[in-house]
Image (tube, rainbow, N blue to C red):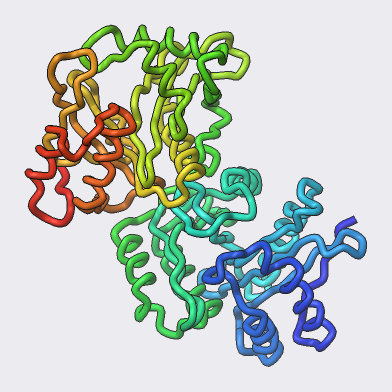
Amino acid sequence: MITFRELTAHRDDLAVLAEFHRSLYVGLFPDPDERESLANMAGYLRLKEHGWYGANDYHIVLAFVGDLLAGAVIADYLAEPAAGVIEYLLVSPDVRGRGVGRALMDHIEAVLAADASAGGRELAGVVAEMNDPRAVSAMADTLDPVARALIWHRYGYVGLDFPYRQPALSPGQAPVTGLILIGKPLSAAWRERVPASAIILVVREYLRWAMRIERPADSAEYRCMAAHLSARDDVGRLPLDRYVGHDAARPLDVHAVTGADDPDFARTLDVYRIAFPPGPTAVGEDEFRRAVAEPGYHLWALRAEPADPAPSGMASFHAFTAAALLGYVTLTGPLRGSGRFPALVARLEQRLLADRPEVRGWYAEIGPGTDPAPFHRVGCRELAVDYRQPALGASEDVPCRLFFKPPGRSYDPPRLTVSDLLTDLAELLSAVYGVAEPREHPTYQRIAGGLTADVVPLR
């Protein structure tokens, strides 16, 4: 049986809070810039006791399975927007899968709804910060970020599509990027549409009451968020299952081919040969045999369903030190025109982040006759460089368009420095095309000589 205990500023509760902070909280929030101090939490409970929050409220609720501390939720009620904010929801690894998270969620939503009702309001919705599963993070997560996104999806939350940035929690901490603000609409108004003005108000009040930023407008992070939201009427919704490439309505099964002896190796090459007949940008089976044995190289067999006897698509990509090259990709049969390319990109970016946690992005060579529209739709941008793919089956290098995309959501054009591009290009030429002296290759020389600024221009 799961029971709950809401903490107060009473001495006994503060002792329980200290034990919770030491034994559970710190370990599940390893990033010190994301972590609230014990002193702050205790201070907030004392402020609540003395009425500082006014019509707002602050809650620390612990969940127990028997005598075992199983989880906790820390949340704020913000009276002006009539919305709740979940600051932290955590479940002990010892009891995951036993319904503790769902029970905590249901409990805190009822508590926040009671807060709103006490002021004669209906709870508009609840928002929460979540590590973006498709964003670069310098700190390893304590839970698979894709699994977390799917859990919150089952809770009824969606991603709120704007560039969320958490301001520094204290003078000794740094702002936190790599987050996404998620929300659960509860009122009729929010279920139909999520007004951008409402989210501006939620963020402003959250900074005021939870982060103790008296003047949010003085925060560069708040100004950036407010400027983006003020330019639109509504906030776009990102279904979290789709965002991580696991849309139940359009499933995509990805099998990573482990070697030339994998049964899907031959099947994947059958798909490849149909989509990429012999020509200047095609390679033979021996090249795939060599590549699939190399570290950093991925060859995927793609199916609509795991039970499909043969793949209907394939993708290959090669990860370098801080970037990757998307090689061959095609979706055929039931996958063609099915809207699954964004799901494939989501899965690719998650794999890249697992391989290279600080990857800056990935490149794609768009050859003659290839429609770049699908790449534009997922946020790729063409670099204004004279790129030519080193000769494969042809006697001369093949002119191609070179596209680039950072992982995750894109709100502004990517800023790729010339230094980073040239570093990535040298690795690409060496690892993918076997160029012994990549900086002497005509492709490298042509691009290096044509760039005069510090940042690579875009088309």
Residue 155 visible, this orientation: yes
- Residue drawn where x is 45% and y is 40% of the image: 352
Picture layout, residue 245 above or below residue 331: below
Task: Answer with left or right where residue 206 lies relative to residue 411.
Answer: right
Query: Which of the 4 image quadrants contains residue 147?
Result: top right
Q: Identify the residue at the far front of this view.
A: 436
Position of residue 70 measured from the top left corner of the image (x, y, whole percent): 80, 60
Q: In which quarter of the image is the N terminus?
A: bottom right
Residue drawn at x 49%, y 52% as measured from the top left: 132
Classify residue 382 by image quadrant. Answer: top left
Q: Measured from the top left, where is residue 18 in percent x and y?
A: 76, 79
Q: Where in the figure is residue 2, as x and y percent of width and height?
A: 86, 58
Q: Position of residue 459 (x, y in %)?
A: 14, 41
- The relative height of residue 393 versus residue 110 in the rendered view (above or below) is above
Q: Is residue 246 left or right of residue 14?
A: left
Q: Is residue 112 depicted above or below 105 in this figure?
A: below
Please indicate whether residue 186 sits to the left or right of residue 299 in the image.
right
Q: Is 237 placed left or right of 308 in the picture?
A: left
Foreground: 112 or 420? 420
Name the foreground residue: 393 vs 126: 393
Q: Residue at 51%, 73% (x, y): give it.
A: 206
Is residue 86 something that shows in the picture?
A: no
- Residue located 23% across and 21% down the image: 370
Q: How many numbered marks does the figure carry?
A: 0
Asked which quadrant contains residue 400, the reply is: top left
Between 437 and 87, the one lying in front of the other is: 437
Residue 167, above or below 371: below
